[in-house]
Amino acid sequence: METILNHEQLPRRARRSRNALKVSLAVGCASLLAACGSGASSSATSGQSKAIAGSHHHSSITITEEDWYGVPGPANIGAQYLIDFFKNYSKKHPGVKIVRKAPPGSGYFSLVLSQASAGNLPDLLMIDNPDVPTLASTGTILPLKKLGSINTSGINPANLKETTYNGSLYCMPMYTNTIAIFYNKKMFAKAGITTPPRTWAQLLADGKKLTTPKVYGFLYQTGGGNGGPGTWQSDPFIWSNGGSRRHIDATPAVQAISFLRELVKDGVSPTAVVNWTQQQTIEEFEAGKAAMVENGLWNIPNMQASYKSLDWGTFQIPTRLASQHAITPFGGETWCVPTTNTAHEKAAFKILQAMAAGTNIVQIAKGIDDVPTRESSWKLSPWNEPVYAAFLAELKNARARTEYYTTDETQVSTIVGSAIESAVIGKESVIAALRGAQAQISKLKVGG
């Protein structure tokens, strides 16, 4: 058994509690041929299966798995679940060894692209959901239907859409997340606010009431989740108003960014929103320095366990009009099978099938501090608790960030994110900043 692990901490838009996943494990699959070539015949495969069934002394196949989840820690029970899962799988299916690689999250996707270019891809790969179209369009990963059938019954249709490219499902979305608003109930009561805001106007008005010299009324951050240009936390305001990055200088987007600008201009939100990460904003909230904060559901378990004296709740991201509904971006990672060779592809797919079967999705999601993609599981604990309700409602209408831009999504997010940052702090007018962004993204491909 072997683990190749890099201990660098991952900066990411997703959950802060993922400090973990050091795996040293062996996983077996008795029905597969221990070979590296893609030309193995079906009769040879059958013969190998019989040999494995009749003896403990058999050749094996080594499968490489790669993810960015990092080193193990007490906050990540998902890591231990995966370790135990693969160990149990190994006992039932001797014959396949898994070597886990855990490179750092910073530069992770660039590493994957380099591996593809060098013909050195892992056999089972975890990727961030916006990266699916890039890898699918280049043939780096395989459509799952080419490998067999996998259980997608009951999975939130919006999640399946995010991992579908040109009509084919390329990755398995087993767990997911999104963003909503956390609020301090005691601060609301003190300010005489009885219900969370539903519209932008109400959010601004309530934010002004809640803002004090020591407390921010509302915290969000304009970056992509980790600081730096991006649209992760701005997308809901644009999308819910009928806008998109495809027409970022159109009225719906201009209205949305003008509102975010107004929050800063009126002192409800600090100019630091252009520099802070999601972790910093939730920490301000936990410390009682913010009345409301836009952040992700992955924070819930930690807040319940570590901030028991904090009286808080959640609500959906407000919209410009009460008749509109919140449209938020999907977070969370997905699992796929890269193009390697027949034997390795089949072996990796069988492992993926097992991961996606039965209650395994529930256990993995619980450990990762996410929500299972299978909707029937939302009735289970902890997701049936009131604090999850806002997030679950949003997941029904959530959108992949690659809906309009596929292979250029990262570039678009950076371009638009930079424009939003400039507009929010008043460096440029909103319309000038967004027109500049539109001029750049109009040169890129439009897909999906």
Image: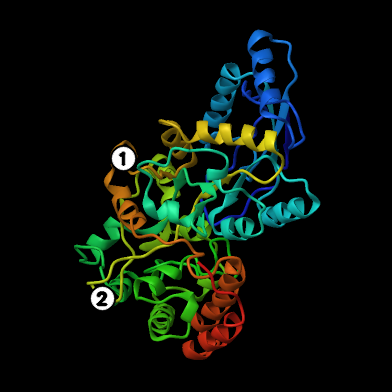
**Residue 183: percent from left, percent from top:** 33, 59
Is residue 287 visible in the rendered image? The answer is no
Q: Which residue is mark 2?
A: 321
Image point (61%, 82%), residue name? 443
- The one of 196 and 229 positioned closer to us in this rendering: 229
**Residue 68: percent from left, percent from top:** 63, 46
Q: Quadrant of residue 50?
A: top right
Q: Amino acid at mark 1?
A: Ser
The answer to whether residue 108 is left or right of residue 394 is right
* Secondary structure of residue under mark 1: helix
Image point (36%, 76%), residue name? 242
Q: Which residue is mark 1?
A: 376
**Residue 201: percent from left, percent from top:** 28, 77
Image point (37%, 52%), residue name? 157
| Number of other residues with Cα within 10 Å of mark 2, as a class: few under 14, some 14 to 19, many 20 or more | few
Image point (54%, 26%), residue name? 85
Which is nearer the N-term, disc 2 or disc 1? Answer: 2
Q: In the rendered view, would you say 407 is above or below 83?
A: below
Q: In the rendered view, would you say 130 is above or below 365?
A: below
- The one of 427 and 354 positioned closer to us in this rendering: 354
Q: Amino acid at mark 2?
A: Leu
The answer to whether residue 315 is left or right of residue 92 is left
Q: In the rendered view, would you say 42 is above or below 395?
A: above
Colouring convention used in this rendered image of the protein: rainbow
- The one of 116 and 417 positioned closer to us in this rendering: 116
Is residue 310 visible in the rendered image? The answer is yes
